């Protein structure tokens, strides 16, 4: 039996990976666009769909998928908040995810953004691109070995970044509710307020819990940070209060800010605003106007060879296991007959 799979949000560079890793010979339909309401008909005749973050898997689309005969609603992401689990249960969908992928992908991006802001390389190369080869006071910086780096969240990604910074000679401190023995070998754990007070760079790797830590990076949080610090967020956009960050940058409480994420980023990322009637969020626009003190990447943290391989391989394994064994270790939602949601 040939299993037909519609894969959404497949970028050009990802296409060969999908084909090379397709060892189970699924019949793949690779679709560049994210799943939306206006292209749901691309799932007609499919047995399974494979989503990425920011695809729309709400009740309306899930109902359509059920009508089209889709049984398996998978995502190649760790998070699955883009899937309406109650609707998926109501329409007897099997939902699975990718629980993890290369932590180096995110950690290396965080490190790169932090070092770019610390050494003012983006500022400098922008000037030289415009044929200005003079050196000014902005280009002066501390060396990373003379800096303290605070890592918030020392799971796989945060700990990987901590090891990278420590390898460069920085003093690395950490904050986490769960302080693993492995992390203790790399970071010195501190209370959050103490960490913020002494860190030259603060990098966020805390999971987002809706209703619990929304906009935790707010004015109060920033007020506890060291003057002139650099803030990096490659975790979740919902964790940051953009307006508070903007004010901190304008007052120079923060020297620099870099992010790979925004709340409601489906309205921002993966599209162009040039020559369009679409309006960019005004606070986001004001942050962008502070370039190169503000660096924004469009949720590209996982866009590496290793991370992509991990996500595709695990997704294909999930589907193969469900079809051949009736289950996968990476289940999020079982079909309606059990009505069990696994966290």
Image: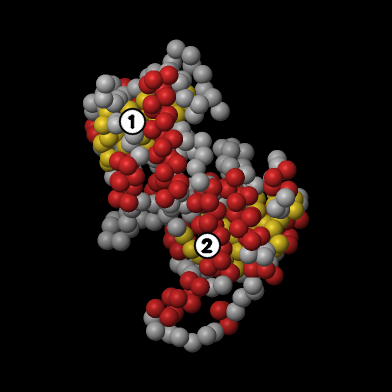
Residue under label 1: 24
Question: Is residue 87 or residue 324 the one in the foreground?
Answer: 324
Which residue is at 48% across, 71% downward?
Answer: 122
Q: Earlier in the sequence, mark 2 or mark 1?
A: 1
At 43% across and 15% down in the image, what residue appears? 336
Query: Which residue appears at 76% of the width and 55% of the height?
Result: 194
- Disc 1 element: loop
Give the image location of residue 7, x and y in percent.
32, 37
Horizontally, residue 157 falls left or right of residue 105, namely right
Which quadrant of the rendered structure holds the N terminus? top left
User: Where residue 161 sits in the image (x, y, percent)?
Assistant: 60, 54
Q: Is residue 45 left or right of residue 265?
A: left
Is residue 297 among what the camera can see?
Answer: yes
Q: Which mark is residue 112?
A: 2
Q: Name the residue nearer the viewer: 2 or 32.
A: 2
**Model colouring:** secondary structure
Measured as percent of width and height from the top left, residue 147 is found at 68, 67
Between marks 2 and 1, how big is the CA–CA gap?
A: 37 Å
The vertical placement of 158 against 283, above or below, is: above
Total numbered labels: 2
């Amino acid at each position: 039996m040939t299993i037909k799979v519609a894969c959404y949000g497949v970028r050009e560079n990802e296409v060969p990976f999908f084909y090379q890793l397709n060892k189970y010979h699924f019949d793949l339909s690779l679709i560049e666009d994210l799943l939306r309401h206006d292209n749901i008909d691309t799932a007609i005749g499919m047995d399974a769909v494979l989503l990425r973050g920011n695809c729309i898997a709400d009740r309306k689309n899930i109902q359509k998928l059920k009508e089209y005969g889709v049984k398996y609603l998978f995502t190649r992401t760790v998070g699955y908040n883009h899937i309406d689990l109650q609707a998926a249960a109501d329409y007897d969908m099997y939902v699975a995810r990718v629980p993890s992928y290369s932590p180096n992908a995110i950690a290396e991006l965080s490190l790169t953004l932090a070092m770019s802001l610390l050494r003012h390389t983006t500022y400098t190369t922008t000037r030289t691109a415009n044929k200005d080869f003079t050196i000014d006071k902005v280009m002066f910086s501390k060396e990373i070995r003379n800096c303290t780096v605070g890592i918030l969240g020392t799971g796989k990604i945060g700990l990987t970044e901590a090891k990278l910074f420590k390898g460069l000679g920085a003093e690395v401190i950490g904050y986490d509710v769960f302080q693993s023995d492995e992390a203790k070998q790399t970071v010195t754990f501190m209370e959050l307020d103490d960490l913020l007070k002494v860190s030259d760079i603060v990098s966020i790797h805390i999971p987002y819990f809706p209703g619990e830590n929304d906009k935790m990076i707010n004015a109060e949080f920033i007020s506890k940070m060291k003057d002139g610090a650099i803030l990096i967020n490659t975790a979740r956009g919902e964790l940051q209060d953009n307006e508070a960050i903007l004010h901190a940058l304008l007052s120079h409480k923060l020297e620099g800010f870099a992010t790979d994420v925004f709340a409601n980023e489906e309205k921002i990322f993966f599209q162009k605003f040039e020559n369009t009637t679409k309006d960019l969020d005004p606070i986001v626009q004001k942050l962008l106007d502070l370039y190169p003190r503000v660096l924004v990447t469009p949720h590209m943290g996982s866009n590496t060879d290793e991370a992509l391989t991990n996500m595709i391989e695990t997704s294909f394994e999930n589907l193969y296991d469900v079809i051949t064994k009736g289950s996968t270790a990476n289940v999020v939602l079982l079909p309606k007959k059990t009505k069990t949601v696994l966290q």
